[in-house]
Image: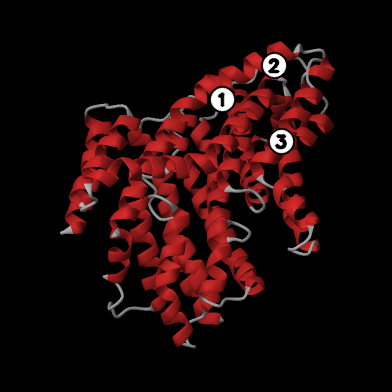
């Protein structure tokens, strides 16, 4: 019966948003309360559940998203985005720009958490879109596909990194196998799939539209790339340097602090404000006004993410995520496919790829550890692929793609959801093919 309740809850959410055009944040709250009542969460606990879900998701994303929005606004307003996009187009040419964006997304996606990479690089996509007159979502799909694949398949991202010890996999082999699977998946879900959505018109948020300047007004190529790539370099460096310190030392403690994406973004924003603003004669007051504008545009996205967090927490507190997984334990099927199905089902119901991957890993771990015929490294990849499957309205990534690219709900399903579905399905196929040879 709980499966019916989940279907009712998600159906109400979709109807409220798609048919009756209710504000997504309000729709999430209504669906969350309805889901909590149907799934047996005590009424007195429902407000706490909603607050916990909102706080938990926003607590990890708000600082990064807000600071990155300001950073993106500065990159656009200063002309750095225009300089970078012009250089990319000049080097790759319009014919190969999709591949340049795919490569950029992959390089950035390895060291950075998905949301950080998204808000840092999407403004560059918009800059290319404004100059080439190509649809933004057409250009964005390769970048988003690369970010999604690295987030779901490769360490040091939270879910794949945490799954390795759960199933006693080898970190090095998992990364090697992950790269073998990830590269063709990115190509399929990126440049190849993008050609099928080229007709979809998308007009990005006005806040990220760069001010077109003459070449004399633009910051130098070196300065533009340096500032834009600084977050990648610093966070990646921090993730490497932290391993040089003993976990009990003060140095380790400081590196954990300094390597946090939120702290890094705050430092980088200060540096960028000087390099692209104050040092070029732009009044600090003007730059702060630009930052305030960026926050206004980002507020609806934060509310939508908060609503998605509330619904996710309802499913977790009700225990339905464990029931969903437990119900699949007795199915007679290839363990790699079973793991993928568990992660995919939890992903569809909860929205969070990280929660889906880790929950499914905990369920599959006893089976993997007891059966030497199951390759634990491939199980990590199978779970990671399943956790990326079919992102929809209960996933914050769905709403970030919709709002940033200013897409209709229908077009978001046709682009983002289908792209994520390809990432999940193609990943499973890649794992099964690899299982034949290893």
Q: Residue at x 63, y 71 (%)?
A: 171
Q: Which residue is mark 3?
A: 88
Question: Along the polypeptide, which appears first: circle 3 or circle 2?
Answer: 3
Q: Which residue is mark 2?
A: 287
Q: Is residue 67 left or right of residue 433?
A: right
- In terms of image quadrants, where is residue 371? bottom left
Going by the picture, which residue comes out furthest to the left?
1
Q: Nearer the viewer, mark 3 or mark 2?
A: 2
The residue labelled by disc 1 is: 133
Which residue is drawn at the image coordinates 24% and 47% (left, top)? Answer: 36
Q: CA distance from mark 1 to mark 2?
A: 28 Å
Distance in Å between CA atoms under marks 3 and 1: 15 Å
Q: Is residue 55 visible in this depiction of the protein? A: yes
Left or right: residue 162 versus residue 210 is left
Image coordinates for residue 238, horizontal then vertical, percent: 75, 51
Mark drawn on residue 70: none
The color scheme shown is: secondary structure
Q: Is residue 332 above or below residue 160?
A: below
Marks 1 and 2: which is nearer the front? 2
């Amino acid at each position: 019966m709980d499966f019916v309740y989940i279907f009712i809850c998600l159906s109400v959410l979709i109807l409220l948003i798609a048919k009756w055009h209710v504000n997504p944040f309000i729709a999430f709250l209504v669906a969350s309360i309805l889901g909590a009542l149907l799934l047996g969460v005590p009424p007195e606990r429902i407000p706490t559940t909603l607050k916990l879900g909102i706080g938990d998701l926003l607590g990890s994303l708000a600082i990064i998203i807000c600071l990155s929005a300001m950073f993106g606004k500065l990159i656009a307003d200063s002309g750095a985005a225009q300089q970078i996009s012009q250089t990319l187009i000049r080097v790759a040419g319009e014919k190969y720009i999709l591949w340049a964006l795919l490569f950029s997304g992959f390089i950035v996606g390895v060291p950075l958490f998905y949301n950080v990479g998204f808000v840092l690089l999407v403004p560059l996509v918009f800059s290319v879109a404004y100059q080439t007159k190509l649809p933004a979502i057409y250009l964005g799909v390769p970048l988003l596909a690369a970010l999604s694949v690295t987030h779901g398949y490769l360490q040091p991202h939270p879910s794949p990194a945490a799954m390795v010890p759960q199933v006693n996999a080898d970190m090095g082999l998992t990364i090697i196998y992950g790269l073998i699977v990830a590269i063709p998946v990115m190509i399929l879900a990126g440049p190849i799939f993008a050609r099928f959505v080229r007709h979809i018109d998308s007009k990005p948020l006005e806040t990220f539209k760069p001010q077109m300047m003459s070449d004399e007004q633009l910051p130098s190529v070196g300065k533009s790339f340096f500032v834009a790539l600084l977050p990648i370099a610093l966070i990646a460096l921090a993730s490497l340097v932290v391993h040089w310190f003993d976990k009990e030392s003060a140095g380790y403690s400081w590196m954990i602090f300094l390597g946090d994406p939120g702290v890094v973004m705050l430092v980088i924003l200060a540096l960028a404000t000087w390099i692209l603003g104050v040092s070029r004669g732009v009044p600090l007051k003007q730059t702060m006004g630009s930052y305030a504008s960026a926050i206004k545009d980002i507020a609806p996205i934060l509310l939508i993410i908060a609503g998605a967090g509330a619904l996710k927490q309802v499913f977790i507190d009700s225990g339905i995520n464990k029931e969903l997984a437990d119900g699949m334990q007795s199915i007679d099927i290839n363990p790699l496919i079973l793991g993928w199905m568990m992660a995919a089902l939890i992903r569809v119901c909860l929205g969070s790829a990280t929660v889906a991957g880790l929950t499914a890993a905990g369920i599959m771990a006893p089976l993997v550890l007891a059966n030497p015929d199951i390759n634990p490294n491939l199980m990590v990849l199978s779970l990671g692929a399943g956790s990326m499957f079919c992102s929809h309205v209960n996933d914050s990534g769905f709403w970030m793609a919709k709002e940033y690219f200013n897409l209709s709900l229908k077009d978001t399903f046709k682009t983002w959801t289908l792209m994520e579905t390809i990432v999940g399905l193609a990943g499973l196929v890649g794992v099964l093919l690899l299982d034949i040879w290893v």
